[in-house]
Amino acid sequence: MQLLPLLSFVTFTLLAQLSAAANTFAGSNLYYAAGLTQAQRTTLLKGLQSAGMKVLRVWLDGQSSAQKGTNIEPFPDLEPTQICNGDESCYDDTVLERIDEFMIDAHSYGIKLIITMHSFNALQAGDVYGKIYGTGYFYEQTAPQQAFDKRLVHILNHVHTTLGLPWKQLNEYIFGFEAENEAMIGKGEAYIQSHTAWQCDRATTIKNQLGSNSGILVLTGGESWVNESVQSAWLSCAALDVISLHAYGVGDFATSSLTPYVTQAVNAGKKLIMEEWGACYFTTENNNCPQGSVLSTSTRNDNIKTWAAQITAAGLSWLYWQVLPNNDPHQSYDYEIGIGDASWSTLQTAAKAADSGTSPFDFSPYLL
């Protein structure tokens, strides 16, 4: 038994892994980013840059009124009155053109976008797909899936109004695409497990448009909590690059709870990201945050600091839900933090600390 050479090999391997480790990063979400005015965009992007945040996740659902205290410029759904099913004259590209402007500004602040191409929220609220197919048939029947794939193809081939290139070629501006925010979330974990092919099929549609070397990632869009977000079928889906974790229960923030999923992803050759998490403003349970007594600022700040550090320590990059360009109005389910709010400096510090975290997932080729 040659112990010394064996120990030397193990030590060398460990050192090689550590030296090859990538850094984590932080970012944020803003589902109504397409509605921001130029001044609001500037405030938001300057704030994100000051926190060292590198990615912002945006949605394409239409919005008609103020959101989270932000007086937006309204914009319609991409398919405002009917399922377009590939009819190019039917789509209303207003939201895509708004994001055209947004991504140019974001790029100037060193920020790329994750583009969420639909949401379960819109489906459940009765958009053009929800009205016809509801929240079940939409995932079960062939016709809505084919029509939805044509929506995805339309988005990916939208030609940027300034850059003159389709979105699927804009890897300097776009970090990744995902078909839907929290697909099937309202149907329960058993339903998701029975319909995992929906996610992989949509990812395949996206990947077929992007090609294999686009420099743009394909993500899942997350689910209700960590375990529900990591389905074995998605770990083996060739078209998916990144498994998105969404979590609001504090147990899911523990480093020891997250590391097994990190291992699963590494073993499957996938990347993992904490795409949504937040710290409730109220004294309720963190994952059930409708209204309640106000949590002390010091306690909330401690929560933000602790949970962000735990997520980072697990080797996960993360996106906070959400940073606002205005003071947080503290509405129901309040995880938001406005730039300049009492907890903003704490979130800034946590996000900057993420830059020095180590991770087995190297996102550096996809960041500015």
Image (spheres, rainbow, N blue to C red):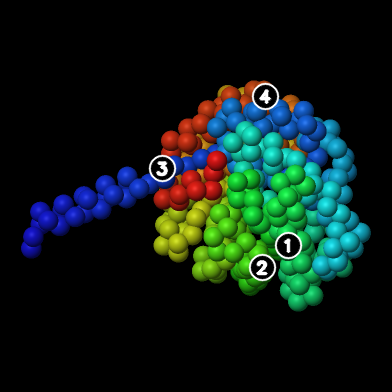
Q: Is residue 187 above or below residue 303?
A: below
Q: Earlier in the sequence, mark 3 or mark 2?
A: 2
Few, some or many residues within 10 Å of mark 3 (<14, 14–19, 20+): many
Q: Is residue 196 above or below residue 110?
A: below
At numbered mark 1, what does the secondary structure look like: helix, strand or loop?
helix
* Residue in the image at 58% along x and 24% along y: 345
Q: Which residue is mark 3?
A: 358
State how far apart marks 1 and 3 are (Cα). 34 Å
State how far apart marks 1 and 4 are (Cα). 37 Å
Q: Which residue is mark 4?
A: 341
Instruction: Report if residue 276 is visible in the image.
Output: no
Q: Which residue is mark 1?
A: 152
Report the number of discs. 4
- Looking at the picture, how far across and down is residue 72, in whole percent? 83, 36
- The amino acid marked with disc number 1 is Leu
- Looking at the picture, how far across and down is residue 234, in whole percent? 56, 66
Q: Earlier in the sequence, mark 1 or mark 2?
A: 1
Question: Do callouts 1 and 2 mark residues in contact (Cβ within 8 Å)?
Answer: yes
- The amino acid marked with disc number 4 is Asp
- The amino acid marked with disc number 2 is Thr
Question: Do callouts 1 and 3 mark residues in contact (Cβ within 8 Å)?
Answer: no
For the C terminus, the image quarter is top right
Few, some or many residues within 10 Å of mark 4 (<14, 14–19, 20+): some
Marks 3, 4: nearer the viewer: 3
- The amino acid marked with disc number 3 is Thr
* Residue in the image at 43% along x and 58% along y: 266
* Residue 205 circle label: 2
* Residue in the image at 48% along x and 32% along y: 353
State how far apart marks 1 and 2 are (Cα). 8 Å
For the N terminus, the image quarter is bottom left
